[in-house]
Amino acid sequence: MFEVVGEDENARAGKLHTAHGTVDTPCFMPVATKGSVKTLSSDELGDMDIEAIISNAFVLYLKPGIDVIEKAGGLHRFMNWDRTLFTDSGGFQMLKKEFVFNVSEKGVMFRSPFDDTRHMFTPEKCVEVQEVLESDVVMVLDDCPPYGKDHKHMRDSIMRTTNWAKRSKVAHKHKKQLLFAIVQGGVFRNLREKSATSLVEMDFDGYGIGGLSIGETRKKMFEVLEYTLPLLPEEKPRYLMGVGSPGELLESISLGVDIFDSAFPTRNARHNAVYTWNGSYNITRGKYTNDFSPLEEGCNCYACQKYTRAYVRHLMVVYEMLGMRLITIHNLHFLRELMRKTRETVLENRFSKFKKEFNKIMGLCQ
Amino acid sequence: MFEVVGEDENARAGKLHTAHGTVDTPCFMPVATKGSVKTLSSDELGDMDIEAIISNAFVLYLKPGIDVIEKAGGLHRFMNWDRTLFTDSGGFQMLKKEFVFNVSEKGVMFRSPFDDTRHMFTPEKCVEVQEVLESDVVMVLDDCPPYGKDHKHMRDSIMRTTNWAKRSKVAHKHKKQLLFAIVQGGVFRNLREKSATSLVEMDFDGYGIGGLSIGETRKKMFEVLEYTLPLLPEEKPRYLMGVGSPGELLESISLGVDIFDSAFPTRNARHNAVYTWNGSYNITRGKYTNDFSPLEEGCNCYACQKYTRAYVRHLMVVYEMLGMRLITIHNLHFLRELMRKTRETVLENRFSKFKKEFNKIMGLCQ
């Protein structure tokens, strides 16, 4: 279900085969938390050749409810998406205090932000929900504490994550769905190692790396990746959850990550940030008032083919939704192209040069 | 520039020829006040075969400023729209108290809602602004008082509107742009008559009917149309401004109106109202939770081809913008079809039967 088709030092080019097609890696997944990549139709994603997106089991369980999606014939049908679909478990939602009543060995007692009701999410329940959603890749329920918890707390947490992963594996019946475990352990090396090795022993279809990009420094994040990734089996896909910026993607790929997701490129689009090969910029700046070039010169995304900076700037200044759509399209197209080029350079053994040149222009912060 | 190609009692089917193509009438124009039909791209409007839209000179004058649109090469280019484009003058904005400092014979001193600055809009200035915008149909600046003003106020007001129309005609140089006057006079028959006859004497390319659907009863509105429309020349297009609902469109067409615009079908879309041949409904109602049929059975709009009520309902409930897009597409498609069928029935001399059947199902309120 996963093949590594090329390597350049630690960077990898691969193919992830799922029930809904093949995903070329490295791959960046747009986020469709509530069953929609914000502002876009599934056709627009398809037109950009986006091969995989990720939705959220817990959020969909609350609204519209999994009974609705079950009756629709699964999440693919419900949202009219016919390519690869990941679903996250809900573990990440534990980072939001207002979403959680308490966590026990049994599972997480979530609080619905919609109506304050309580919902027990056990690892088994979480697999079951995702079976109903019929996503192609199921993420196990993990215990994801906020950044800054002490070693003891984090040690208990990874034990729980490991136990939950074990229970998830037992509960996992629909074998055409891939099941990914999630490595936790915060910024503690021995805990990350313990978490990774115990999960790898259980032999999952792939491994998420969770609990990063949640407050630790960027340097620390790469340090964690550097010692965690070598512990994961080479023949399995590695998915860094919740990352991130173009610079972070390339750096993480150089350490051996295959798959990413993040709400930033789409959220930033709605806050005026346009990604380009020369860095990002805020479209509402005065200098774009009379700029009738496209969002990025030479880009062949829909927004750049049809509209100018001056127009998109105007739309954003007067809060017209079309502006958000156009920048979202551009940013996702940019990341798709970035992943495509990255893959090419890995296959041609010139990735580190590519990354170096990219960083010279963009920096990690971009 | 306008031909009546068919008549059925007072209802008309026509062709309005503008610098950007031919508009079949009756025609409903979606509103692009700030240079964008909310949530949609110009391609989406084109795909629905929308032949004309209307934007607003005063609003665009404030933001992005006409210098920007002039540099872009006109509003068509700025917003990437290559079909017929009307621009309203700003007279309608006088209905919003907070937009106006004062009105004099000279013109309107507007207050910018963006930054509180003052902007003098004379009839000449208004024509000049629209020349820069290069719209296909220019609406003169009219004096549009709120509903409920007394006879004396309204009499002074139509005198002003007439004088302004005269000055607009003198100022109008770009003859490839059509110039429409606007009949005012509130709900006073003698004033409507005076306004209409004095404007008709000046021989404009078409006539707007303004100051309706602003608070008077629906019955009163049709009464006004009934005695005003016969005063307008048969060979010129008649444009009822700011109307409205499907039922109101048909009733107005039966009285001789050719062209309409209104923000309601798009605004209502963003507030969950779906238009259909069986009346409108609120998509967020519980009964649609598990309804996997399209927004309207048999409809061939993009939204109905691709998505279900259950999905659109979910999107609206969780405030996903794609939901607003999809309902906007559906509602505009519905009105486009309504105008197409109406035209067909006029050409085939069976309009009144069509209207009767439509009203039986929809009522005027729909």
Image: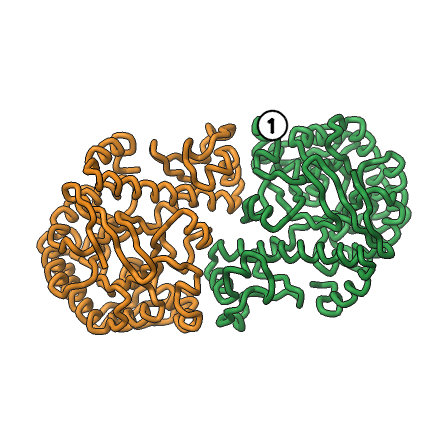
Chain colours: A orange, B green
Q: Residues within 10 Å of mark 1 (few under 14, many from 20)?
A: some
**For this view, does B22 lie left or right of residue A188?**
right
- Which quadrant of the figure contains the N terminus of chain B? top right
Percent position (x, y) of residue B72? Answer: 57, 29
Q: What element carries label 1?
A: helix
- Which quadrant of the figure contains the C terminus of chain B? bottom right
Image mark 1: chain: B
**Looking at numbered disc 1 in the image, what kind of residue is underneath it?**
Glu
Which residue is at 39% across, 59% downward?
Answer: A82
**For this view, does A149 lie left or right of residue B240?**
left
Which residue is at 86% across, 42% downward?
Answer: B195
Question: Quick check: A18 above or below B157?
Answer: below
Is residue B225 among what the camera can see? no
Q: In which quarter of the image is residue B100?
A: top right
Question: Quick check: B345 above or below A166?
Answer: above
**For this view, does A170 lie left or right of residue B26?**
left
Q: Residue under circle 1?
A: B70
**For this view, does A172 lie left or right of residue A300?**
left
Is residue B294 among what the camera can see? yes
Percent position (x, y) of residue B274? Answer: 60, 62
Percent position (x, y) of residue B166? Answer: 83, 31
Percent position (x, y) of residue A118? Answer: 34, 72
Which residue is at 21% across, 41% downward?
Answer: A346
